[in-house]
Amino acid sequence: MAKDKILIVDDEEHILELIKFNLENSGYEVVTCNTGTNALNVIRKELPKLILLDLMLPGMDGYDICKEIRKDNTIANIPVIMITAKSEELDKILGLELGADDYITKPFSVRELLARVKAVLRRVSTQFVDTSCKFGNMTIDFDKHEVLKHEKRVDLTLKEFELLEILIKNKGRVMTRDFLLDKIWGYEYIGETRTVDVHIRHLRQKIEDDDKNPKYIETIRGIGYRFSYGD
């Protein structure tokens, strides 16, 4: 069984080693980072199950890192426990308002930290994850990579399906062309926004009843696309 991966972001070496030692003894896989500047790159590369984030970091503080995490759809759902020497109530409230899932102040007991880690991971593991959705005359099964329209299979290319999936899972949010390029085609395609437009056009032809007047995939002029459908 795969171990849950936890990322510790802290610039105090003794704290980093203490937490790492105890988490590994408790059966977790541990990755560490000691600067705020590198934290986001490490998060995107490692995709941990949980982040333990110190507030006072060189280069970029924990508040700003947490804000950036919550703005990036690829990592926004990763839970964050903030760790800091600050104990004032306003600091705690600000951290939680910025998207932290929990908050613990130094000095803390290892037992308390482990209990909070287990509690947050337990909440994450019990969250319901949609594997399919229905809208209008469409049924999408994300696990099977299957799209049905009027109960008949719609043949999509892999990129078309990935594009549709990311739009649906971010229903109501505007997805920029550059964001879609990065997440589906990779960095080498940045700047080639026509790639997205061509795939959107093909996708509309396959899923919309009238691709010239799309009901689901809305164009946000000069920015990108948004997926909309009634609940």
Image (cartoon, rainbow, N blue to C red):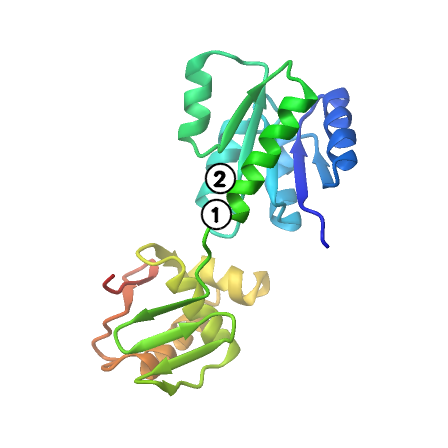
Q: Badge 2 local density, few (<14 within 10 Å), some, or many (20+)?
A: some
Q: Is residue 172 above or below residue 157?
A: above
Q: Is residue 1 above or below residue 52?
A: below
Query: The C terminus appears in which quarter of the rendering?
Result: bottom left
Q: Measured from the top left, where is residue 175 in percent x and y?
A: 38, 58
Question: Residue 51: which quarter of the image?
Answer: top right
Amino acid, disc 1: Asp
Residue matched to label 2: 68
Cα separation between marks 2 and 1: 6 Å
Tell me the residue at 46%/74% (across/down).
Answer: 161
**Residue placed under numbered mark 1 in the picture:** 72
Left or right, 123 with respect to 29, comes to left
Tell me the quarter of the picture where residue 37 sits.
Answer: top right
Q: In front: 86, or 22?
A: 22
Figure check: 184 above or below 56: below
Instruction: Verify CB contact (< 8 Å) between mark 2 and mark 1.
Output: yes
Residue at x 55%, y 48% (from the top left corner): 125
Q: Residue furthest bottom?
A: 152
Q: Position of residue 101 (x, y in %)?
A: 49, 33
Q: Can you see residue 190?
A: no
Q: Position of residue 212 (x, y in %)?
A: 23, 79
In the image, 194 versus 155, the foreground residue is: 155
Q: Is residue 15 above or below residue 39?
A: above
Residue 196's mark? none
Local secondary structure at mark 2? helix
Q: Secondary structure at mark 1?
A: loop
Residue in view at x 46 percent, y 51 percent: 73
Q: Camera-side residue: 58 or 158?
A: 158
Asked if residue 159 can be seen in this view, the reply is yes
